[in-house]
Image: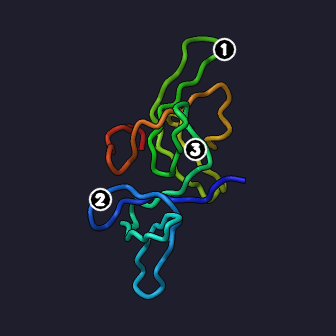
Amino acid sequence: MRDIKFRGKRADNGQWVYGYLIKDCDDNKFYITNTRAIYHEVNPDTIGQYTGLKDINNKEIYEGNIVLISMSMIYGKPIEQNCKVWFEERLSSFVCNWGNNPPVRIGSFCNTAFEVIGNIYDNPGLVKND
């Protein structure tokens, strides 16, 4: 079973926080809390869910991350491309684009290495085919 956790940028200082997501019913604010019950209000535009996957450096992959995909090809040279990770409701899965192709589930790539190289909030220019 995978951890269902989130990350978001704190509303007061812009630092990333990780943990469980809570929505305030009265004023529609979002908070992320850790196991010590410390609540941080976060910017809702920066909230991303943990995909349950880790990259080649054992770093957790979150929705909104930019990953470098390195795919070894049987015929020809290896392919590398930056890709934005997001949740595609139509596929009920975390996906990314491989070039101009339709979104592909990130868990379905074979012989592929993922490396988190940034995120769309701090490094928006890392993805060209967004």
In this picture, residue 63 sits left or right of residue 11 = right
Seen in the picture, residue 116 relative to 74 is either above or below; the reply is below
Seen at 44% across and 61% down, the residue is 47
* Of labels 2 and 1, the one closer to you: 2
Seen at 55% across and 53% down, the residue is 50
Label at residue 14: 2
Q: What is the distance, in whole Å, between disc 2 and disc 1 at their CAs? A: 44 Å
Q: Which of marks 2 and 1 is nearer the N terminus?
A: 2
Q: Residues within 10 Å of mark 3 (few under 14, many from 20)?
A: some
Residue 54 picture location, percent across and down: 58, 40
Indicate the amino acid at tag 3.
Pro
The residue under label 3 is 103
Seen in the picture, residue 48 relative to 79 is either above or below; the reply is below
Seen in the picture, residue 110 relative to 126 is either above or below; the reply is above
Indicate the amino acid at tag 2.
Gly
Residue 77 picture location, percent across and down: 55, 12
Residue lying farthest left? Answer: 13
Q: Are marks 2 and 1 in contact (CB under 8 Å)?
A: no
The residue under label 1 is 74
Q: Earlier in the sequence, mark 2 or mark 3?
A: 2
